[in-house]
């Protein structure tokens, strides 16, 4: 009998994933990863996704479906590898996506290590995505979920072939409403539980307050400047801003203006017009390719530069072992350094990388 280690957050998705794996005949163990303590985020852990209630909900579901449950502690490593990375990227003028880092290093990194340590065959999570093996190319391929409104392939683009080979996403073929129905039918304690949309360690959404607690310092005010470098106002610290931001700037120009660039070295935030946000070419590093071994030959694909957008027509070419250039057919608004660009061929994820530069039009 194949054995599966189920990553359980205490939410409905991972709970139904565990249930489905039992129905498939797998020998399962549930596990919750403890990633931080309340003093690390300045919040009461009763109100966050690593809360005691969430842990108890996960344990309750495991008891109900008759599988063992284990808590794994990664607080110090999570602080070093995810929180530190998050803060350092913001301080470098980037806008990071910590979920992508966490997926690579913890959910499909250290959890797969634990899977092997426990003598198990697969890691299972409640992500909405699919995995299949392409016999022709001899590669594992990540696919979009059937429920495109819940598809999470964007934040999974960094998975390696080894990780894909040892991962199962039971919810990839289900809609969210079907998952809720399964949870209700089985009387799971979390069947109607609300989903969190925030970064797990910034549950109130105030990432600057988190950074100030993390660094034990405040960020210095600086200058708003226009595209020519003229000072047009004062900002409250460049980490407060991201590309495309319009609200909360605190400057009156007589018409809408936007953040078009961030200069951390000089503590300046560049302000421009809406049209100044549009560019068609970006460079990404830290690339990971899934469905193909390389992209040195230019290739037409679709790509998206943030989670909540529809992918757009583009051409990609690989520059070296670690970088790709993506040129969109039409200029895209607010391409943001630090975010991921993810490449698609139909339902398949070709790969992706971290945006590090924008070729200005």
Image (cartoon, grey):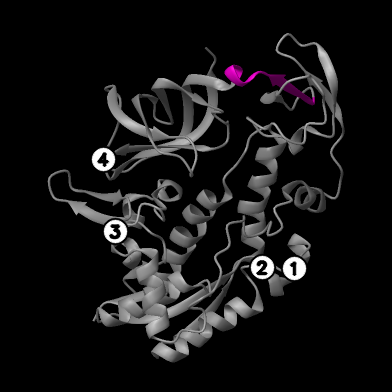
Disc on res. 165: 3
> Which residue is the site of mark 2?
48
Image spot of residue 118 (x, y percent): 41, 77
Q: Is residue 275 one of those drawn in magenta? A: yes
Nearer to us: label 4 or label 3: 4
SS state under label 4: loop
Cα separation between marks 2 and 1 = 9 Å
Quarter of the image where one finds residue 297: top left
- Name which of mark 1 and mark 4 comes first in the sequence: 1
- Name which of mark 4 and mark 2 comes first in the sequence: 2
Cα separation between marks 3 and 1 = 35 Å
Image spot of residue 163 (x, y percent): 36, 56
* Closer to us: 337 or 287: 337
Disc on res. 70: none
Q: Is residue 327 above or below residue 192?
A: above
- Name which of mark 2 and mark 1 comes first in the sequence: 1
Query: Counting other residues with Cα less than 10 Å from the Cα at mark 3, is it few (<14), some (14-19), or many (20 or more)?
Result: some
Cα separation between marks 4 and 2 = 36 Å
SS state under label 1: helix
SS state under label 2: loop
Cα separation between marks 3 and 2 = 31 Å
> Is the residue under label 2 in contact with that under label 3 (CB below 8 Å)?
no
Rendered-image quadrant of the N terminus: bottom left
Q: Which residues are magenta?
A: 267-276
> Which residue is the site of mark 1?
38
> Is the residue under label 1 in contact with that under label 2 (CB below 8 Å)?
yes
> Which residue is the site of mark 4?
346
């Amino acid at each position: 009998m194949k054995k599966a280690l189920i990553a359980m957050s205490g939410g409905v998705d991972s709970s139904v994933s565990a249930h489905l794996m039992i129905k498939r005949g797998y020998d399962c163990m549930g596990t919750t990863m403890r990633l931080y303590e309340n003093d690390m985020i300045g919040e009461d852990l009763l109100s966050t996704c690593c809360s005691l209630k969430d842990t108890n909900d996960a344990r309750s579901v495991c008891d109900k479906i008759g599988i063992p449950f284990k808590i794994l502690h990664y607080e110090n490593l999570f602080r070093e590898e995810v929180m530190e990375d998050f803060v350092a990227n913001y301080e470098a003028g980037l806008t990071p996506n910590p979920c992508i880092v966490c997926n690579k290093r913890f959910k499909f990194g250290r959890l797969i290590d634990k899977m092997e340590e426990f003598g198990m065959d697969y890691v299972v999570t409640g992500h909405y995505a699919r995995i299949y093996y392409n016999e022709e190319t001899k590669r594992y391929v990540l696919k979009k979920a059937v429920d495109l409104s819940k598809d999470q392939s964007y934040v999974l683009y960094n998975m390696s072939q080894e990780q894909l080979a040892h991962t199962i996403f039971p919810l990839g073929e289900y809609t969210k409403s079907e998952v809720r129905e399964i949870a209700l039918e089985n009387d799971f304690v979390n069947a109607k539980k609300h989903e969190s949309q925030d970064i797990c360690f910034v549950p109130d959404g105030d990432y600057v307050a988190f950074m100030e607690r993390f660094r034990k310092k405040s960020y210095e005010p600086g200058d708003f400047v226009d595209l020519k470098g003229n000072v047009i106002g004062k900002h409250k610290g460049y980490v407060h801003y991201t590309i495309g931001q319009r609200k909360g700037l605190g400057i009156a120009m007589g018409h809408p203006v936007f953040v078009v660039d961030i200069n951390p070295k000089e503590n300046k935030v560049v302000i421009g017009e809406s049209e100044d946000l549009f560019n068609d070419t970006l460079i990404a590093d830290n690339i990971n390719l899934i469905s193909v071994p390389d992209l040195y030959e230019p290739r037409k694909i679709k790509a998206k530069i943030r989670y909540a957008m529809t992918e757009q027509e583009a051409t990609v070419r690989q520059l070296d072992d670690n970088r790709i250039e993506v040129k969109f057919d039409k200029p895209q608004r607010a391409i943001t350094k630090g975010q991921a660009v993810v490449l698609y061929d139909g339902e398949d994820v070709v790969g992706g990388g971290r945006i590090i530069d924008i070729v200005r039009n």
